[in-house]
Amino acid sequence: MSIINSLNTAVSGLNSQSHAFSDLSNNIANSQTTGYKAATTSFADYVTSNDLASDGESLSDSVAATTRQHTDNQGMVVSSTNTLALAISGNGFFNVVQPTGSTTSSTAPTFSSQQFYTRNGDFSQNNQGYLVNTSGYYLEGYQVGSEGALSSTLSPIKISDSVAFQPTKSTTVSLSAAIGSTSGAEGTNTSTATAYDSKGNAQEVSLNWNQSSTDPLVWTVSNSADSSNSATVKFNSDGSLASVNGASQSTGSAATFSYTGLPQDMTVNLGTIGSTSGVSLATDSSNYSTNPTMTTDSVTSGTFTGLSMQSDGSVMATFDNGLSQLLAKIPLSTFADPNGLSAQNGQAYTATASSGAPTVNAVNTNGAGTLSTSSTESSTTDLTSDLTKLIVAQQAYGANTKIVTTANQLLQTTLAMIQ
């Protein structure tokens, strides 16, 4: 190998060690960056001359450095005071997008068609209600629509300032009223209630009450929409409940029958056997309720108090009544080769041919990983290791400068021979 080739080799060494310095400095600078994945430097020798070694193979006379990503490395999950922060333990990435142009509180943002992926789960709600991480990326998920169903399309999650409480599903209908009298004959009555389905939609439920023509203490109650859905209710002479459907029931036991139909099947609670606190008969023929109103176990009101994140990816609205309701669901994307992703600003990545197309998964399925709430994923930078590597790179850089100095001295000696 000639002196000139030695200079070229030394210069390639200097360039490669400079590359290593750049990777190490980037790791060290991002040692506190949420979701940052530390990179390493790989070196490879190159053959650039036609000189042959004694065995006939070409001699390598150069070196090149490349950066290797390690996006599949798991960072430490640490607790956070931010209740909207999420940390992934597994292979998944959050789906995020960026707005196009500047955004203000008075104008709705428009979003780039470019899909991004990140492990930075330090989210907060911006002034327009969107969930945004510290790098300015907008979190995407499946949002609950106006009819209470989850969308099948990913979109930036937006929460309004005041979320309306959706009435809870009715499971029990209760009646507490005198529906007739013990001295009546073939009396009739109707009781009604407003029941709610699983999506919070209201529907009126009606029960028809008919007194027996032969026994004034026996009544038939039936679903107004389906007369075959009925029960026989017997009362005592003092107007208290005696039995439902002829069953032998002890005093103090619950008196119920099953309602089948819309908005869903429910239990009708008539009160307690031996008591007049529920359905009863009046001993005075004029002292009973006409068209009494029934109640349901649905909670119909609540004031929005804030958001909470769940470990299954659910974004929940919390209310002052102690209940929570689903607003959106966060999925995670996985890749065949996450190290093939293309790094972008702000701890984000885009898919490439090397990484493969994303697969969108529910949390904790197909290796996507689990979520820790009120937590963030730390940088994977190992300061101790990188500082050690920095010393090694410094020594290697110095050794290459020594080659340049020595080659220069040899050249000067050679030139002096002809003077």
Image (cartoon, helix red, strand yellow):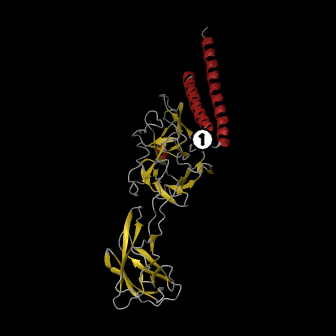
* Position in image of residue 405 (x %, y %): 64, 21
Which residue occupies the foreground of this view, 111 or 419?
Answer: 111
* Position in image of residue 52 (x %, y %): 49, 31
For label 1, the residue is: 33
Q: Residues within 10 Å of mark 1 (few under 14, many from 20)?
A: some
Which residue occupies the foreground of this view, 251 or 92?
Answer: 251
Position of the C terminus by quadrant: top right
Q: Is residue 291 left or right of residue 4?
A: left
Residue that protrudes farthest toward the top in the picture: 419
Q: How many marks?
A: 1
Which residue occupies the foreground of this view, 174 or 51?
Answer: 174
* Position in image of residue 26 (x %, y %): 59, 35
**Residue 335 shows up from this direction:** no
* SS for callout 1: loop
Instruction: Name the residue at 46% across, 64% down.
Output: 168
* Position in image of residue 202 (x %, y %): 39, 63
**Residue 261 shows up from this direction:** yes
Which residue occupies the foreground of this view, 246 or 315?
Answer: 246
Q: Is residue 371 above or below residue 409?
A: below
Q: Quadrant of residue 295?
A: bottom left
The kind of residue tagged 1 is Thr
Position of the N terminus by quadrant: top right
Q: Is residue 373 above or below residue 268?
A: above
Q: Is residue 111 left or right of residue 64?
A: left
Q: Is residue 246 above or below residue 47?
A: below
